[in-house]
Image (spheres, rainbow, N blue to C red):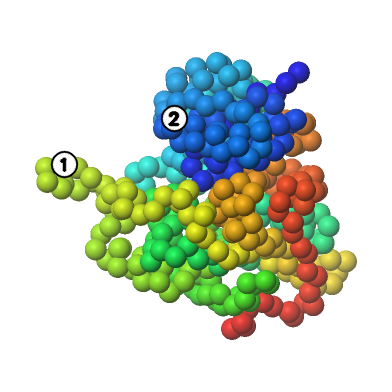
Amino acid sequence: MSTNTLIVGAGGVGNVVAFKCAMNAKTFGHITLASRTLSKCDAIAAHVKAKTGIEIATAQVDADNKEELVELIRKTDADIVINVALPYQDLTIMDACIQCGVDYLDTANYEHPDEAKFEYKEQWARDEAFKKADIMGLLGSGFDPGATNVFCAYAQKHYFDEIHTIDILDCNAGDHGYPFATNFNPEINLREVSAKGRYWEDGKWIETEPMEIKQVWDYPEVGPKESYLLYHEEMESLIKHIKGLKRIRFFMTFGESYLKHMEVLENVGMLGIEPIMHKGEQIVPIEFLKTLLPDPASLGARTKGKTNIGIFAKGIKDGKPQTIYIYQVKDHEECYAEVMSQGVSYTTGVPAMIGAKLMIEGVWKKKGVVNMEEMDPDPFMEEMMQQGLPWKVLKLEAHEDFRVDA
């Protein structure tokens, strides 16, 4: 029996998911790409047909409207919904899947549109409803969260009896040539980066000022890059599932120009999420800023350089100290040549496809709402090797470090 796959969201990541599902059409069967803007779906579908020969259907849907989503899920007879829309829309899409009894997958956890905060609380609260509907909801199947969670589970399964510390390291050394642009949805990106940092140590969360903690990491195939501590969602679930964990942190690279632009924009109020009056009308500053910045989906053709995302873990194996670095390097130009997207969209979209593939094939099967590290990591790691995201494991001496300023 053929599978029916519904993809919701037609941004940069949606483009990658559509391409990669088409390239795995034997698994994904009849594919429909839906978004609020039908023209975006049609453009992606045309590119997919031209490069792969696979036809995908398109549809218009308001992902904030549960009734519209339910109608579309039933119309397409979807077996799985891949949510690559905005994080604000996670709960609506999840509720539509519950009503229709259809498996669900996303790449980023729920974020309230009126509050610069993201957490799994409201998604986890739907666990019982997913179980009653006899369906699976896989949360955070991007790269970080997503592949990084799987890296942690893989390290725990194969290299450690206990993992004591984890540093998640996200390096984007790509250059798009613009003075300032964001690599994914500007509103989501800027809210995330301008928020206070947090890391978990000795059983509690420790809050930092934005960009307060900086380290220089020497990333393989990229080189030394300034890396800043942020709060990132995968830490919230990993502290529940990694045995012996004493500390977990997340670092992301930023260039000097990006940070200077961020500082100025914040100082003049352009990152605000509260409505203000402008010429008699209410506008939200960060939403207005989004209209001024380049569309992340347009960056692919002009971005050069590489990404390097991975985990640096320390712990114990057979009573002895163990240090492991698992990472994946991807070239932006290679991504564009394959699926007409830059590397940040690629490294998010491919894991989304892989997670969905494992669910459809029954390799990953669990009722309720689950995070990536709760599943067997081996099949996912094998698929990464086959689907364009080859990874490496470095087994280091206990004292070795990739920090230039260590």
Q: Mark 1 sits on what residue?
A: 281
Dividing the picture into quadrants, the one containing residue 222 is bottom right
In the rendered image, which quarter is residue 263 located in? bottom left
Q: Position of residue 161 (x, y in %)?
A: 82, 60
Residue 38 - label: 2
* Image point (42%, 28%), residue name: 62
Q: In which quarter of the image is the C terminus?
A: bottom right
**Viewer-proximal residue, 159 or 82?**
82
Residue 135 in the figure: left or right of residue 263:
right
Question: Can you give x and y, in whole percent of width and height, for residue 162 in the image?
Answer: 77, 61
Q: Residue 178 sits in which quadrant? A: bottom left
Number of residues whose C-alpha sits closer than 10 Å to that of mark 2, classed few (under 14), some (14–19) or many (20 or more): some
Residue plotted at (44% across, 30% down)? 38
Name the residue type under label 2: Leu
SS assignment at label 1: strand
Which residue extends farthest left? 280
Q: Residue at x 78, y 64 (%)?
A: 393
Q: In screen coordinates, is 328 left or right of 56?
A: right
Q: Nearer the viewer, mark 1 or mark 2?
A: 2
* Res 257 visible: yes
In the picture, the quarter occupied by the N terminus is: top right
Q: Is residue 315 visible?
A: no
Most foreground residue, 405 or 7: 7
Q: In terms of sequence position, does the residue under pointer 1 or pointer 2 come before the other?
A: 2
Q: Which residue lies furthest to the right in this view?
A: 318
- Residue 376 versus residue 4 in the image, above or below: below
Q: How crowded is mark 1: few (under 14 residues within 10 Å), some or many (20 or more)?
A: few
